[in-house]
Image (tube, rainbow, N blue to C red):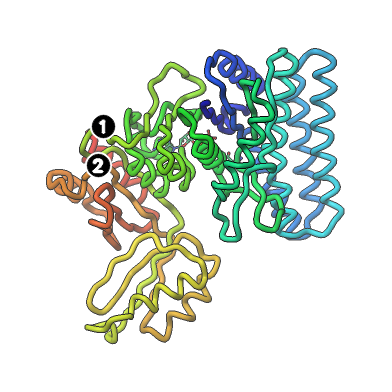
Amino acid sequence: MKIMKFGGTSVGRPERMQHIAAMVTKETEPAIIVLSALSGTTNALVEIGEHLSHGDKAAAKKNIDQLETHYHDFISQLVTKPEASEKAKAIVAEHFEFLNIILRISFSEALSKDILAQGELLSTKLFSCYLEEQNIDHVLLPALEFMTIDSNDEPQIGSIKVKLSQLLQKNSDKKLFITQGYICKNARGEVDNLKRGGSDYTASLIAAAIGASVCEIWTDIDGMHNNDPRIVNRTVPVEQLSFDEAAELAYFGAKILHPASIWPAQTYKVPVKLLNTMQPDAKGTLITEKAGSVGVKAVAAKDNIIAIRVKSSRMLLAYGFLRKIFEVFEKYRTPIDMITTSEVAVSLTIDTDASLNDILKELEPFGTVEVDKDQTIISVVGNEISRTESIIKKLFGSIMNVPVRMVSYGGSPHNISLLIPAEYKKQILQQLNKGMFNL
Ligand code: ADP
Ligand code: ASP
Ligand code: MG
């Protein structure tokens, strides 16, 4: 069994959805197809939720109506036979009726998750409707029946495995399965999600749960590139990455993969392939245990970083100081990305300001606390790079004129991270492209 995940742009137009149907029916191996919402839909649903949370029902209604028109246009080109057309219209009507009902009830956090789930529910049902029209035998597996997270928002791989296996066994004569990416149920039994870009995570979790032969992530680019193609002009695909390298790149900002999407595949040793739906014959990127080669593979940038420095002479020769500082972040469930220390100060970074004020208040008794917002982490990733002298020379030689606030070196042999003010991001990515990759 293989997993094939198609992202928003891959299903975002009727002809693309039809193209995917043609692709998956060519498969000889049984497959689970994981679909994202049509591109733009989740952003629109986020906006609707925001309007409602501010009590602006008129603005929410306007967005709902616009989105509904978009879906009517979409299905009019997706399916043509009267029966399929009626069915597609009924699917769209059902989900937009739900959104319109929400307009009338009082808003809550749980309700906002229900709103967000509509995108993947719509895309998979419409895809299924098209397959039906084409007489392509398949089964729609509802993700909300098997994809669960615990009270720490961690996926419950054991239970996912049991529930999914049961669903597959019930349909053991079938070869093609369709399911929703991104959405899940939480510990309270409510509809929830795996955070933005979470369909990659769904695909990897399913691949791990069923021991898939491969987890294919089909997107709008031919694999992981050596640098962020949205910012740097000349970038090239990387043919092979190790799980460790891919996980670092995903975590430190390479948008092509959800930050947590590598660990399930890595833990259960399922190879991951990043492939281009618009160019199915392109090689893409293969991610396995093997790095393929030593040396720098790619650079990624993670935005909206906050740096916090705690300065205290009491730190000098003291033990237990760092533990007390870390406990504050643990209490507010805020992960720390980078950390550097000196005899009298510790600097660390976080990527959310959700509990920033509480954290700062609790850090105050430890010494002078300084905060820098709008920082960016630049990560240079590659097998054994921090042990390769020539790479380190090249790296520091190519970041001239950029004020570096922190350097993290040696924590992982595959990653060297730099913290810089966000306004230097484009410049440093370009300089690294030239200095490290000759591009
Ligand atoms: P999908 O909707 O298929 O999940 P995403 O938009 O989430 O697609 O991810 C693909 C996009 O990631 C690409 O179009 C590209 O702009 C962006 N991206 C950022 N960094 C990289 C990188 N290093 N390599 C490839 N793509 C990247
Ligand atoms: N539709 C969700 C999002 O836009 C999940 C995904 O596309 O992976 O974040
Ligand atoms: Mg994505």
Secondary element type, mark 1 = loop
Please tell me how many numbered marks the rendered image carries: 2
Cβ of mark 2 under 8 A from ligand 1: no
Q: Which of 238 and 269 is in front in this view?
A: 269
Q: Determine whether 366 is above or below 75 in the image.
A: below
Q: What residue sits 45% from the left and 75% below the top?
A: 328
Q: What residue sits 71% from the left and 37% below the top?
A: 121
Residue 391: x %, y % from top left: 17, 44
Mark 2 crowdedness (10 Å alpha carbons): few <14, some 14-19, many ≥20: many
Q: Which amino acid does label 2 sit on?
A: Asn
Q: What residue sits 50% from the left and 21% below the top?
A: 278
Residue 195: x %, y % from top left: 57, 49
Quadrant the C terminus occupies: top left
In the picture, residue 374 is in which quadrant? bottom left
Q: Which mark is residue 292?
A: 1
Q: Which of 371 and 423 is in front in this view?
A: 371
Q: Which of marks 1 and 2 is nearer the N terminus?
A: 1
Q: Are marks 1 and 2 in contact (CB under 8 Å)?
A: yes
Q: Which mark is residue 307?
A: none
Q: Determine whether 282 is above or below 56 in the image.
A: above
Q: Which of 286 and 395 is in front in this view?
A: 286
Q: How far apart are marks 1 and 2 (CA)?
A: 9 Å
| Residue occupied by mark 2 | 383
Q: Which amino acid does label 1 sit on?
A: Gly
Secondary element type, mark 2 = strand
Ligand 2 is found in which quarter of the picture?
Answer: top right
